[in-house]
């Protein structure tokens, strides 16, 4: 049993060699290669202009909220186009179905208004 | 392929034999660098318009291995300064040059970039070599695309003969230090 497990030792060695070679060359090349670095060179490239502030700056969630609400009601309008094209074929049944769909979204719209989702200040 | 007009660069001087070719590393590196100079256009005036013609199909700078215009200094080899550089623009130009990866070369295209040109006033930098080291000057106001191509070919000659050790030499460090670039 003991000798069976020892037979697998070369595989472990090969694994260590493969991983070790990759890690060693990556680390080694960063030490061996010539390089020139300075404070100015390592700065973010902003077309040569001094950058102001930090890119990780929080901005108002209102932008996101308005954008998402826009997408929601935009899609609603898109659904109305095929209905308008097939208005006669779908008849009263289609009107009722669209009415339910619109009603659900209008409920959502009133919810947004009540929650003051569209108030900018 | 008999009517192909593709020119292939000749191999550098070396010893050729059955299945092997031996030459100097600096020759091979120089050849590779010279034929793949990626330009970073820094166009501020009318010379930039001439450079647009140089890039386009008629003059086609891509024939010289400069197909890819780089608009970030990180992957550029050749900074082409085309146009009047005002003194307010000088630190910006220097910052762009400093952020380029080594090895880097500079061509001053046109009279303004080379010497200030007709703008001999308080507000205009009298030549970009006041702020960054320049390898090739292209005269003209503005120069024709042929002249810009000639400038690029002259730079190729410089690049081809540049030693691979030049950028780590004390002379080069001294040159950069004289421009206050670390």
Image: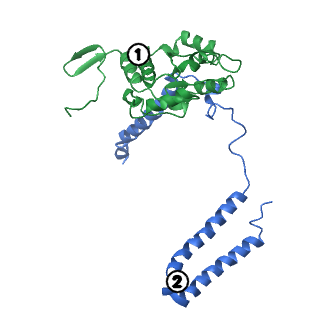
Chain colours: A blue, B green
Label placed on residue B157: 1
Residue, far top:
B171
Q: Is residue B5 above or below residue A94?
A: above
Residue B182 visible within the image: no
Q: Quadrant of the C terminus of chain B?
A: top right
Lateral position of residue B85 relative to residue B8, left or right: right
Lateral position of residue A94 relative to residue B95, left or right: left
Residue A116 visible within the image: yes
Q: Which residue is mark 2?
A: A87
Residue B73, percent across and down? 55, 30
Q: Is residue B135 above or below residue B58?
A: above
Q: Residues within 10 Å of mark 2 (few under 14, many from 20)?
A: some
- Residue occupying image coordinates x 52% and y 25%: B80
Q: Quadrant of the N terminus of chain B?
A: top left
For marks 2 and 1, give the CA distance. 74 Å
Label placed on residue A68: none
Badge 2 element? helix
Residue, far right:
A121
Tell me whether circle 2 and circle 1 mark residues in contact (CB < 8 Å): no
Badge 1 element? helix
Closer to the eye: label 2 or 1 = 2
Q: Is residue B106 above or below residue A101?
A: above
- Residue occupying image coordinates x 41% and y 13%: B161
Splitting the image into 4 quarters, where does residue A79 fall? bottom right
Lateral position of residue B74 relative to residue A62, left or right: left
Residue A24, percent across and down? 47, 31
Count of numbered badges drawn on the protein: 2
Q: Please tell me which residue lies in front, B86 or B107.
A: B86
Residue B143, percent across and down? 49, 22
């Amino acid at each position: 049993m003991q000798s069976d497990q020892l037979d697998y030792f070369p595989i472990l060695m090969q694994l260590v060699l493969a991983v070790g070679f990759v890690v060693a060359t990556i680390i080694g090349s960063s030490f061996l290669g010539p390089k020139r670095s300075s404070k100015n060179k390592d700065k973010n490239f902003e077309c040569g202009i001094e950058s102001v502030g930090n890119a990780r700056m929080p901005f108002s969630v209102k932008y996101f909220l308005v954008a998402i609400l826009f997408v929601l009601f935009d899609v609603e309008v898109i659904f109305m186009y095929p209905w308008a094209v097939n208005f006669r074929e779908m008849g009263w049944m289609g009107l009722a179905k669209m009415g339910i769909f619109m009603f659900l979204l209008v409920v959502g719209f009133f919810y947004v208004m009540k929650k003051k989702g569209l108030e900018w200040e | 392929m008999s009517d192909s007009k593709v020119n292939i660069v000749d191999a550098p001087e070396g010893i050729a034999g059955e299945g092997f070719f031996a030459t100097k590393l600096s020759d091979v590196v120089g050849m590779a660098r010279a034929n793949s100079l990626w330009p970073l256009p820094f166009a501020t005036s009318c010379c930039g318009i001439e450079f647009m013609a140089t890039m386009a199909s008629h003059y086609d700078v891509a024939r010289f291995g400069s197909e890819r215009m780089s608009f970030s200094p990180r992957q550029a080899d050749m900074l082409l300064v085309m146009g009047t550089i005002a003194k307010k623009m000088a630190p910006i130009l220097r910052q762009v040059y400093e952020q380029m990866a080594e090895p880097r070369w500079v061509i001053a295209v046109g009279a303004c970039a080379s010497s200030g040109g007709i703008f001999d006033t308080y507000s205009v930098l009298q030549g970009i070599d006041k702020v960054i080291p320049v390898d090739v000057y292209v005269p003209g106001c503005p120069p024709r695309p042929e002249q810009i191509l000639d400038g690029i070919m002259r730079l190729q000659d410089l690049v081809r003969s540049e030693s691979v050790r030049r950028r780590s030499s004390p002379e080069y460090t001294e040159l950069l230090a004289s421009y206050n670039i670390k």
